[in-house]
Image (tube, grey):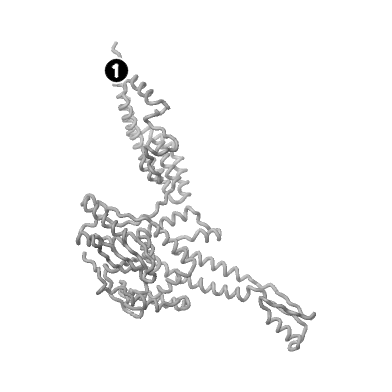
Amino acid sequence: MTLDTTQAEKAGLDYERIKGSIQMRFNPVRQASAERLSSELDSLYFGRLTIARFWDAMQNRDPEIRTAIGKRGDAVEQLEWQVVESENAKEIDAEMAERQCEVLKEFWGNISVTDVYKQDSHGGVGLLARQMLDARAKGWAVHELTWKPRVDGTLTAEFRFCPLYWFENMTGKLRFLLSDFAYYGVEMKPSEWLVTTSDNFMESVTALWIYKKELLQAWVRFCARYGMPLPVIKTDAAPGSGNWNDAVEAASSITEDWAIVLNTGASLEFPTLDRSGDGTFQALYEDLKRTIVTVILGSDLATISAGAGQGQGASLQGKEDAKREKADASLITETLNRSIDKMVLEYTFGENVPILAKFVLVPSKNQDVASDIAVDRMFREFGIPLSQNDVYQRYGRATPSEDDDQVGEAETPDNVGENGQDAEENQLQNDNLGISNEVVDSAKKAIAKARAQDLEGVARELTSILSVDDPQAVLKGLRHFILNSQMRAKHLISNPDRLAHEIEKLLATSFLSGTQLAPKV
């Protein structure tokens, strides 16, 4: 695939475009009224994206929006990334798959990411993922691509994040505006732009934000007018008299630093005002805050819930965070696979090369350790073998080497028998019975495997119960499992499958061995 690695004929970004846009920037919050934002939303439906200026201001200045969006951005920015082989890659061409993995690792490990308004900032995959996630907020996130081939034949690229109001969508596909005054944009080549698309939540947040803003302004005015008690001077003097005028002058002079002299016929009072409106302001303001955060995150922040006494629980919020993080990682992964991986591999290996490797943003693992331990114990009780390496990896522990100091000493089948006898005693007993250790070990493995196969249904049922997210549903499933355990045990005893066959085979082997070694009379 041929990539445009020059800037000569590219309808992209240059110094004058960025400089002109910076000089035309303004504070849209001053113009943010219900009428103006309604007009901007109407323009959005016609393909004009100027409302993105207001959305940028909301994201930067509103504490709830900034915190909630920042939480999503922090989550994806810290994720690890990998390059893995595609499905069936080894069956198609194992050598080519390995080479493609090396190319993509080299590419993604050397990309440069910045922002057209903050070109002093530099990052890699983490920053790119955070910027791409802006599509969740606004519907699109756009990066200009600059390809940079190197002398050793490898390829890298620079990604520059652009504000959304530099584009228009009047034809159903984003087009680049050559200036802030342009009405129609120019076509954007796929090899020159990375466009991330998604459903947006800022359209819903806009109405909530304007109501919250106006409510807060009204609350501030209310506090400015009625937050301090109203001083009242009472006097017996006749209106217009000298004493009356002195009282009026004294009332008008009351400030933070003031003093007043009154005659015996006048008094100064600070009557208590009705502040019942405060509670209405606060209740509505807190509800708007919670709703905004819920729209962005799918659930409110733990700090907000705790303050209102409506917390959802740490475990449930953690599961919601994990689901959202997984969805965000999937959006970024699929976009980069489709838009970047294919171009890099075709540039390196030629057009129409089979794509056998891909970039993956790996979501963090939300492990329920208690549930995993319960399942492992159940497997051990039922005789189902577990891989030692799998257990180490699942719990994030390193496999100990011979030189490591080990905590405790595990009992192994080579040293200890089922009833505590050592290997020599077992061997002596087996020799007396005429059965070799090899036969016994083979029989033990066969019986354990048969028992595991007979109990596969039980294991699947328990695993299914423990994998449910709802704690109440888990308890209900476990109660049902316990109530049916007696009936299940009777069924396994009366209808054995593999276990009975293996026991029969062991008994037959023992009988034949004993017959052959028995003394003749």
Examine the rendering and report whether any part of residue 385 can be seen: yes
Q: Residue furthest toward the right?
A: 264
Query: For this rendering, which residue is in front, 379 or 89?
Result: 89
At a point 50% along the width and 72% down the height, the residue shown is 211
What residue appears at the point 50 percent right and 58 percent down from the top-left corner? 302
Q: Could you say which quadrant of the image residue 14 lies in? A: bottom left
> Which residue is located at x 33 percent, y 79 percent?
183
Crowd around label 1: few <14 · some 14–19 · many ≥20 (10 Å): few
Give the farthest residue toward the bottom: 240
Q: Is residue 450 above or below residue 314?
A: above
- State the image quarter where residue 418 is shown: top left
Find residue 36 and report its horizontal and vertical position in percent: 44, 78
Depth order, front residue of 400/415: 400
Relative to residue 430, is residue 483 depicted above or below? below
Q: Is residue 2 left or right of residue 394?
A: left
Image: 461 above or below 289? above
User: For this rendering, which residue is in front, 2 or 297?
Assistant: 2
Mark 1 highlights which residue?
517
Q: Position of residue 77 (x, y in %)?
A: 39, 60
Is the N terminus in the top left, top right, bottom left or bottom right quadrant?
bottom left
- Is residue 145 depicted above or below 459 in this figure? below
Residue 129: % across, % down: 36, 62
Single out the residue that lies furthest toward the top. 521
Q: Amino acid at mark 1?
A: Leu
